[in-house]
């Protein structure tokens, strides 16, 4: 799989699986602009709690579906989790009160949380090693394409001057956009195969060879040649249905403790910063800059585009300059720009436009860094634990990150005192800088390496002997 050139097959994988982040960005953007707040009688703290409930749903979904993705396969899970999201998000659009909304925001979050584990696993295992970094980072960055789509939709769904429509139907229609897109993507996903790597470790070697043979045949039919796989690249595998939880703990804390610390640090730092800023930006613009609710999308749209462009522009550098240096650079630069914006905000020296421009610059770098956090935790642990690794680190990060919306929602207050929110921004900048330093010290140089070279599969047979039942 790692020696393959880029093909139509890989584009299918990227488009069919990458939509998960588009849907998540769309969902979060709809909530961030809180068009439902007036209709459901919610104050700032309750709006923040709505975001937190969605994030907690993601945590539960990641934990539950992450282990299933390692046990039952990537494909089954990325179909199931998308279906759960579609149903829950659609029902949320009919919410008669905030309690009803919270229930189905939680369930929709479960679906998206499960998506993260299955999708990151599948992408890393299907994409050739020399493209893996840029593809994974770019796909994770498409979250902001969804956020931009949500912002554009809110121009029409939450129009200034037509509050009756916005409060009654506008925000409800917003919840239906994701499910409509998702129905299209479910069709595409039917044509994406199971990960051959996962199949080999689960005793399905023949099916895995069939999938790879078909991909290779299509490449050769197009006139391109493929290098042969040499004997020194082969390994013996003892298939296993699942990894006992005790073994999971040993892998994380005895075999790879430094990698565990690295993954937790990266995931927690980026999650806290993003959730804190993203779920509170609308309240900041409203309360401190008197931006009408219907005009917030005008300010958010360039912010989302900056976050989208960052991973696309900087992603290839993670495969050339390297993981450690680029993570440190993106996290560090994001922290510096955010700290500058905090100082100017506290001094009341900038208006809404300048503040958004500074956010755009900071998150141009932060977006690539945050995407690399998902790349890191999905490639530095054994194949049999990939889904679980993503789920555990994602869960811990989201639990910490879930505090962001509540904390920053409280710091916003009524918009009369800038000090508390500025302090929160300084905290976010410090957290990001710390994450970058940790990555520089403990990071893994995984660029251009096959996943099996970064971490041996647990099912790999160490002794070079023929053992009955082993798969190669």
Image (cartoon, rainbow, N blue to C red):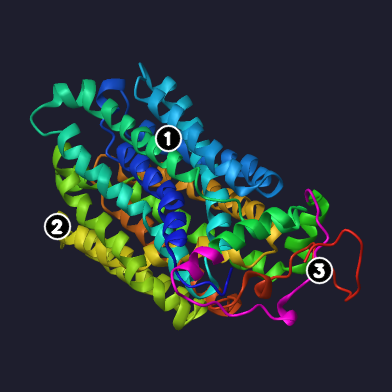
Give how far across and how far down residue 118 sits, in percent: 57, 49
- Regarding mark 3 in the picture, which secondary structure is present there? loop
Q: From which residue to which does the magenta span run?
A: 216-242
Instruction: Give the residue at x 72% y 68%.
Output: 256
Residue displayed at 53% across by 51% down: 119
Is 352 drawn above or below residue 150 in the view shown?
A: below
How dense is the environment of label 1, judged by Cα within 10 Å: few (below 14), some, or many (20 and up)?
many
Q: Secondary structure at mark 1?
A: helix
Q: Earlier in the sequence, mark 1 or mark 2?
A: 1
411 and 23: which is toward the camera = 23
In the rendering, at what x and y percent does residue 218 appear? 50, 63
Residue 334's spot in the image, x, y percent?
A: 36, 69
- Residue hosting label 3: 236
Quadrant assignment, res 274: bottom left
Cα separation, mark 3 vs mark 2, equals 59 Å
Q: Tell me where residue 406 sits by quadrant.
A: top left
Q: In this rendering, would 134 be left or right of 289?
A: right
Residues under labels 3 and 1: Cα distance?
50 Å
From mark 1 to mark 2, how far is it between C-alphas? 27 Å
Query: Does the magenta-highlighted stretch encompass residue 2?
Result: no
Relative side of 138 to 197, left or right: left
- Expressed as whole percent of the image width and height from the top left, the position of residue 243 reads 79, 52
Badge 2 is on which residue? 353
Please identify, in this view, whether the residue under mark 3 or under mark 1 is nearer the observer: 3
> For the view shown, which residue lies furthest in the top direction?
96
Residue 56 appears in the rendering: no
Q: In this figure, which residue is indicated by the disc labeled 1?
A: 49
Q: Secondary structure at mark 2?
A: helix
Q: Nearer the viewer, residue 50 or 93?
A: 93
Nearer to the camera, 168 or 399: 168
């Amino acid at each position: 799989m790692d020696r393959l050139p880029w093909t139509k097959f890989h584009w299918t994988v990227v488009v069919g699986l990458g939509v998960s982040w588009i849907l998540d960005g769309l969902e979060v953007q709809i909530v961030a602009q809180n068009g439902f707040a007036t209709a459901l009688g919610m104050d700032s703290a309750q709006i923040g709690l709505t975001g937190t409930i969605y994030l907690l749903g993601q945590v539960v979904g990641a934990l539950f579906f992450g282990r299933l993705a390692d046990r039952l396969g990537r494909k089954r899970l990325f179909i199931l989790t998308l279906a759960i999201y579609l149903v829950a998000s659609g029902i949320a659009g009919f919410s008669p009160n905030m309690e009803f909304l919270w229930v189905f925001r939680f369930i929709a979050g479960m679906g998206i949380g499960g998506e993260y584990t299955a999708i990151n696993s599948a992408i890393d295992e299907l994409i050739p090693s020399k493209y893996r970094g840029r593809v994974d980072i770019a796909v994770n960055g498409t979250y902001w394409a969804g956020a931009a789509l949500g912002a554009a939709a809110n121009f029409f769904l939450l129009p200034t001057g037509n509050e009756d429509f916005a409060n009654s139907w506008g925000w409800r229609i917003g919840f239906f956009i994701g499910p409509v897109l998702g129905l299209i993507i479910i069709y595409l996903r039917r044509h994406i195969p199971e990960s051959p790597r996962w199949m080999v470790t689960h005793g399905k070697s023949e099916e895995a060879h069939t999938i790879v043979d078909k991909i290779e045949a299509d490449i050769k039919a197009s006139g391109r040649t493929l290098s042969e796989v040499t004997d020194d690249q082969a390994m013996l595998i003892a298939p296993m249905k699942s990894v006992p939880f005790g073994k999971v703990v040993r892998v994380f804390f005895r075999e790879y403790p430094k990698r565990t610390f690295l993954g937790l640090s990266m995931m927690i730092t980026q999650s806290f910063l993003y959730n804190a800023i993203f779920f509170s930006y609308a309240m900041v613009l409203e309360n401190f800059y008197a931006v009408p609710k219907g005009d917030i999308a005008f300010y958010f749209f360039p912010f989302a585009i900056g976050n989208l462009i960052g991973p696309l522009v900087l992603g290839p550098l993670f495969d050339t300059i390297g993981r450690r240096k680029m993570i440190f650079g993106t996290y560090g630069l994001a922290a510096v720009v955010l700290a500058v914006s905090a100082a100017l905000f506290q001094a009341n020296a900038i208006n809404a436009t300048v503040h958004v421009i500074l956010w755009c610059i900071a998150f141009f770098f932060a977006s690539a860094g945050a995407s690399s956090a998902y790349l890191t935790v999905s490639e530095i642990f054994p194949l049999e634990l990939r889904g679980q690794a993503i789920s555990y680190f994602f869960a811990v990060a989201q639990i910490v990150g879930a505090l962001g919306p509540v904390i920053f929602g409280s710091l916003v207050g009524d918009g009369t005192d800038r000090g508390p929110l500025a302090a929160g921004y300084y905290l976010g900048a410090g957290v990001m800088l710390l994450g970058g330093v940790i990555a520089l010290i403990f990071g893994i140089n995984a660029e251009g390496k096959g996943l099996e070279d970064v971490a041996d599969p647990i099912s790999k047979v160490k002794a070079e002997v023929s053992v009955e039942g082993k798969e190669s």
